[in-house]
Image (cartoon, grey):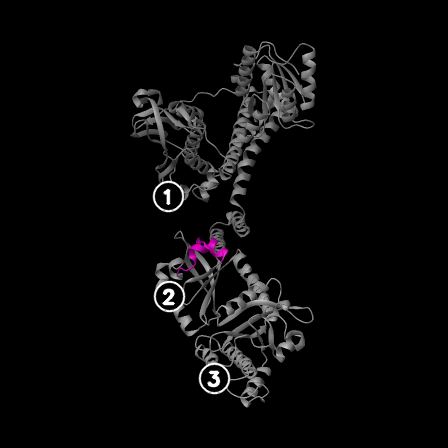
């Protein structure tokens, strides 16, 4: 056994007060701790007493007797208590030398006494935990009396690493000098393993509860405050977990009329630990709307024994919707047997929860395609029909009208996708407001006249001649609003009513109200429309009667926001509707009113719209040599027809490599091209690569890109590749011819001598 540290003489060494002090620490501290902790403390005190008794007997003077004196009865009692304890007892000197280990410690670790006693403890501590243990030794040397040593790893005799915790008490002499540190430790490896398994199980079940999309689970404490709120609850009730946690049940999802009853019932369940029946309830969402749920309840106790109530809610909205649809279908079947198939189909559609969007899009695409293909077949197969010019013209007009409608559907879907992706941009500039309204009226007056509707513009106040906005997007908004007004009106007039409220010099609020005398809407339909959600119309019957994707108003509202404004809705069933575009904008130029623009009074004028061929005939490309690079034979023929009709000489190439060869050959022959129309997506070599190679070779002739991609990014990519301009498919013949003519004239004016590759 090690010798007592220098300075531990017998003078003043009083063991009795020390014994009493050690015991009193544990006795007085039992109040706030568990009984297990108390028993460990008693064992620790006994170990300390035994250590002190050993030290006392090694002293040469003191209470009496020599070092060889036989152990007293009291000492033997302490020794028996310590050595027969199941806890792992040990003691070390202030320098960390092991002075004692109990038989239970030896059995647990597998060491022999001579392997441990007399050696420093550090060799058996895991390297990662040694700094913490040494820190505690230093703190005891500095005056610390007792401590709970956190988890540390101990290397056992068989090489295994086991987790331990320890409670340590300092043993000091009457002068307060540290004699030794005695400890009680426990192997908690199995406890940690079980704890980790428990944690894994908890994480697994918590993940199930949190991630299950169809089952909303909430937990509440005895004060009915939220302690758990899974993702399905967020979706069902509209509150995020952060918003819900800590708030009371009745303040979140309980309707006011159920509040007192729910508080009383839940308090009774908690107080009496009674069973809680399941029930169908109509609860409240964050937005104030009601949702039908089937709610089951479970009462549990937490680790402190406090009750916790868990609610498991299943959304019944879809089930009730299906039940209502089936009841309605059955009623209508009883009333009219001839509608049985229709009602059954609607019920099946409700049961299958088919997407409204896909159904609408299928209708909106297939309807015009049916007309296009049908009339095309008539023109191709009916000889009698082809011989009648009037019937041929009618078929062509119908094909064109349906193709325009199909194109508008595609454009709406593309615009909506760009809006949702945040990629739709606006280009603000000073715009002639009158010209924009003129263009909308001119584009739609034939459609209005076909239904016997008057269409025009009125001024409710002085309006500036020019405003700052994006002309394309402003025209698109008005086109959608006026087009909707025409669709939902069968009589009367449709007006664009303009007014302006000046707020400061050069700025104010412009209001463009599209007013119709159509079918109007109920207050509920008006509220629904005012949300401007995609694929939304007033109701199911309107959708079936009038069709449409339900995208126009949503797109218009998003565009209005991009322009810094909004759309307001007012309607009265049977009297008509008013959709008002409100824009805060800069204004300049002259001011005008109805008296300044008599031609914008309400009117019902129908001018036959010229065909694309009629308009394209007015553009001349006489003498121009144009290379058309296009892999589609039909498109080659169509574009070549319009170019040739305008007087151009057209050569074709089916891909980029053929275009390079044609340009090189034309240069060698001294007959260079005046312009190249380049499709950008082709086999062998696409238009991007062909354009890059031409520009790298010094080719300066204008290149106009032709592409079916209509995004702003596509235009930018074409221009960056080296194209001079851009035209999207399907082509506008007049626009394409004008672009070609402009670039041919511009090139001739700036560079009389063209370069070839």
Location of mark 3 (residue)? 16
Residues in magenta, as a range: 230-247
- Please provide percent x and percent y for residue 724: 56, 21
Image quadrant holding the N terminus, namely bottom right
Is mark 3 in CB contact (under 8 Å) with mark 2?
A: no
Residue 522 badge = 1
| Residue 383 can be seen in this image | no
* On screen, residue 523 above or below 206: above
- Residue positioned 52% across, 38% down in the render: 417
Looking at the image, is mark 1 or mark 2 earlier in the sequence? Answer: 2
Residue 30 badge = none
Determine the secondary structure under disc 1.
Answer: loop
Looking at the image, is mark 3 or mark 2 earlier in the sequence? Answer: 3
Instruction: Pick the residue in front: 241 or 78.
Output: 78
Q: State the CA–CA distance, disc 3 to disc 2.
A: 61 Å
**Does the magenta-highlighted stretch encompass residue 244?**
yes
- Please provide percent x and percent y for residue 524: 38, 46
Q: How many numbered callouts?
A: 3
Instruction: Determine crowd level at label 1: few under 14, some 14-19, many 20+ residues with C-alpha closer than 10 A.
Output: some
Instruction: Pick the residue in front: 222 or 386.
Output: 222
- Please provide percent x and percent y for residue 462: 30, 25
Instruction: Pick the residue in front: 491 or 437.
Output: 437
Nearer to us of marks 1 and 3 is 3
Residue 263 badge = 2
Determine the secondary structure under disc 2.
Answer: helix
Instruction: Pick the residue in front: 242 or 315.
Output: 242
**Does the magenta-highlighted stretch encompass residue 112?**
no
């Amino acid at each position: 056994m090690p010798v007592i540290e220098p300075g531990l003489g017998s003078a003043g060494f009083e063991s009795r007060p020390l014994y009493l002090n050690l015991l009193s620490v544990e006795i007085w501290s039992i109040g706030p701790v568990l009984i297990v902790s108390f028993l460990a403390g008693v064992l620790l005190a006994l170990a300390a007493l035994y250590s002190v008794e050993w030290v006392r007997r090694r002293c040469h003077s003191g209470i009496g007797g020599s070092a060889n004196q036989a152990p007293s009865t009291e000492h033997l009692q302490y020794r028996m208590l310590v050595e027969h304890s199941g806890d792992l007892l040990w003691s070390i000197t202030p320098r960390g030398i092991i002075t004692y280990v109990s038989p239970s410690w030896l059995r647990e670790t597998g060491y022999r006494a001579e392997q441990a006693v007399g050696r420093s403890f550090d060799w058996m501590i895991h390297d990662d935990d040694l700094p913490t243990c040494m820190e505690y030794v230093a703190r005891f040397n500095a005056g610390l009396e007792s401590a709970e040593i956190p988890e540390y790893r101990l290397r056992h005799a068989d090489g295994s690493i086991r987790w331990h915790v320890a409670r340590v008490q300092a043993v000091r002499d009457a002068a307060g000098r540290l004699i030794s540190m005695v400890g009680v430790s426990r192997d908690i490896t199995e406890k940690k393993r079980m704890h980790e398994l428990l944690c894994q199980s908890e994480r697994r079940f918590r993940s199930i509860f949190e991630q299950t999309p169809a089952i909303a689970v909430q937990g509440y404490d005895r004060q009915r405050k939220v302690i758990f709120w899974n993702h399905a609850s967020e979706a069902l009730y509209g509150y995020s977990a952060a918003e819900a946690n800590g708030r009371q049940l009745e303040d979140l999802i309980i309707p006011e009329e159920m509040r007192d009853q729910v508080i009383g019932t839940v308090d009774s369940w908690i107080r009496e630990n009674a069973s809680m029946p399941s029930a169908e309830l109509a609860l409240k969402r964050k937005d104030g709307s009601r949702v039908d749920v089937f709610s089951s309840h479970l009462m549990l106790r937490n680790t402190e024994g406090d009750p916790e109530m868990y609610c498991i809610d299943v959304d019944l909205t879809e089930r009730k919707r299906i039940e209502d649809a089936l009841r309605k279908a059955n009623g209508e079947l009883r009333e009219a047997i001839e509608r049985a198939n229709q009602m059954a189909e609607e019920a099946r559609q409700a049961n299958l929860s088919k997407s409204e969007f896909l159904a609408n899009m299928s209708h909106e695409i297939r309807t015009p395609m049916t007309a296009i293909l049908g009339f095309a077949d008539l023109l191709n197969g009916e000889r009698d029909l082809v011989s009648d010019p009037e019937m041929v013209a009618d078929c062509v007009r119908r094909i064109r009208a349906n193709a325009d409608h199909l194109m508008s559907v595609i454009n709406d879907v593309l615009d909506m996708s760009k809006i949702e992706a945040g990629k739709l941009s606006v280009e603000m500039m000073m715009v002639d407001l009158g010209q924009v309204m003129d263009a909308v009226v001119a584009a739609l007056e034939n459609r209005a006249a076909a239904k016997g509707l008057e269409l025009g513009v009125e001024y409710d106040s002085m309006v500036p001649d020019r405003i700052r906005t994006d002309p394309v997007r402003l025209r698109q908004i008005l086109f959608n609003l006026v087009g909707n007004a025409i669709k939902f009106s069968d009589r009367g007039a449709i007006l664009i009513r303009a007014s302006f409220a000046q707020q400061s010099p050069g700025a104010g609020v412009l209001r463009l109200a599209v007013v119709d005398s159509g079918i109007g809407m109920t207050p509920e339909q008006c509220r629904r429309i005012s949300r401007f959600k995609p694929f939304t119309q007033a109701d199911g019957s309107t959708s079936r009667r009038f069709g449409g994707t339900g995208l126009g108003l949503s797109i218009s509202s998003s565009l209005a926001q991009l322009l810094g404004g909004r759309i307001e809705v007012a309607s009265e069933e049977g009297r008509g509707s008013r959709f008002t575009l409100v824009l805060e904008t800069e204004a300049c130029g002259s001011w005008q009113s109805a008296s300044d623009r008599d031609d914008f009074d309400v009117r019902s004028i129908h001018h036959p719209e010229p065909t694309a061929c009629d308009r394209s005939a007015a553009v001349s490309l006489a003498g121009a040599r144009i290379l058309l690079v296009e892999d589609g034979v039909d498109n080659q023929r169509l574009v070549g027809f319009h170019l040739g009709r305008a007087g151009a000489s057209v050569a074709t190439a089916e891909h980029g490599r053929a275009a390079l060869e044609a340009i090189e050959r034309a240069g060698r022959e001294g007959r260079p091209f005046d312009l190249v129309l380049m499709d950008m997506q082709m086999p062998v070599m696409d238009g991007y690569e062909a354009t890059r190679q031409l520009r790298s070779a010094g080719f300066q002739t204008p290149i106009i890109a032709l592409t079916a991609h209509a995004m702003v990014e596509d235009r930018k990519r074409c221009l960056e590749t080296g194209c001079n301009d851009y035209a999207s498919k399907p082509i506008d013949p007049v626009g394409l011819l004008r672009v070609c003519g402009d670039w041919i004239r511009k090139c001739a004016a700036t560079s009389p001598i063209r370069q070839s590759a």
